[in-house]
Amino acid sequence: EEIGAEAFAGAKPTSLSVETGGKLAVKDLSLYSSDFSTLFYVSPAKTGDFAMDARVTKVAPYAAVRIPFTGISFSPVLKEIGEGAFMNCFDSASDITLSFPSSLRSIGEGAFYMTKVDAVDFSGATSLETIGVSAFEMSYGTGALSFPSSLRSIGEDAFYAAEVTGVSFAEGLLSIGDRAFFGNRNLGGEVVLPASLSSLGDAIFGSWGTNTAMGNEISSLSVAAGSTHFVSENNVVY
């Protein structure tokens, strides 16, 4: 009836099978619902690139943990990536860009925590509304980020120490949580917070052991004209 989060924690099966006519299906060392709408589990024995079945709309919590994928392709109809879904995945020696489909609406808490990637591309994620708490925390190499206009919230610690080098926010964003971009010392350039923003957490651009207000290389921090909640002056937001 139900498969719990981390049900196969610590296991590394080299083959998977299920009874015919049941509620589950197996494909490429991965366990899906019988209609392939949900991805429940990927065996750590899976090597190389991971091609998610094209019918998947949801990745269950902790579906693929600590697997050194050399690449990944998401389902074109994917809507939800669950908590811890790809935590500590990907091969650090591979050139990996995470490119999300237009159908995606939410990225759960810690979904890509401590992953090893070279870039994160949100340009195609035109339906994305939520990036959860610690979603990309310590996901080394996320690079320059450009967020879609559909995005409404970025959770606490979402990109904490994730080697972010630049950020571009679109109008429509409502909230940024505490320390969302903390510890990204190479974060630089101009940062403009959208006028739509109504909630702004503490130390969102902070860093450790620094005498500067932001602890990074941001050259200009301002709020877009028309904001009814915040103003900026001399790189300080009030």
Image (spheres, grey):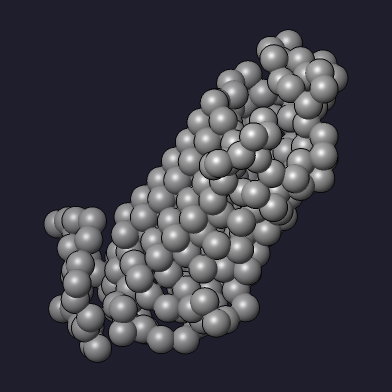
Q: Residue at x 49, y 78 (%)?
A: 91
The answer to whether residue 22 is above or below residue 77 is below
- Residue 162 visible? The answer is yes
The answer to whether residue 164 is above or below residue 196 is below
Residue 64 in the image: state x and y as whole percent.
Answer: 35, 68
The answer to whether residue 78 is above or below residue 219 is below
Please state which of residues 28 and 224 is positioned toward the viewer in this rendering.
Answer: 224
| Residue 75 horizontal side relative to residue 113, left or right | right
Q: Residue 143: which quarter of the image?
A: bottom right
Quarter holding the N terminus is: bottom left
| Residue 12 horizontal side relative to residue 179, left or right | left
Residue 178 in the image: state x and y as whole percent.
Answer: 51, 31
The answer to whether residue 171 is above or below residue 157 is above
Q: Residue at x 47, y 74 (%)?
A: 90
- Residue 145 visible? The answer is no
Please state which of residues 211 and 67 is positioned toward the viewer in this rendering.
Answer: 211
Q: Residue at x 47, y 64 (%)?
A: 115
Q: Residue 113: which quarter of the image?
A: bottom left
Q: Residue at x 55, y 41 (%)?
A: 209
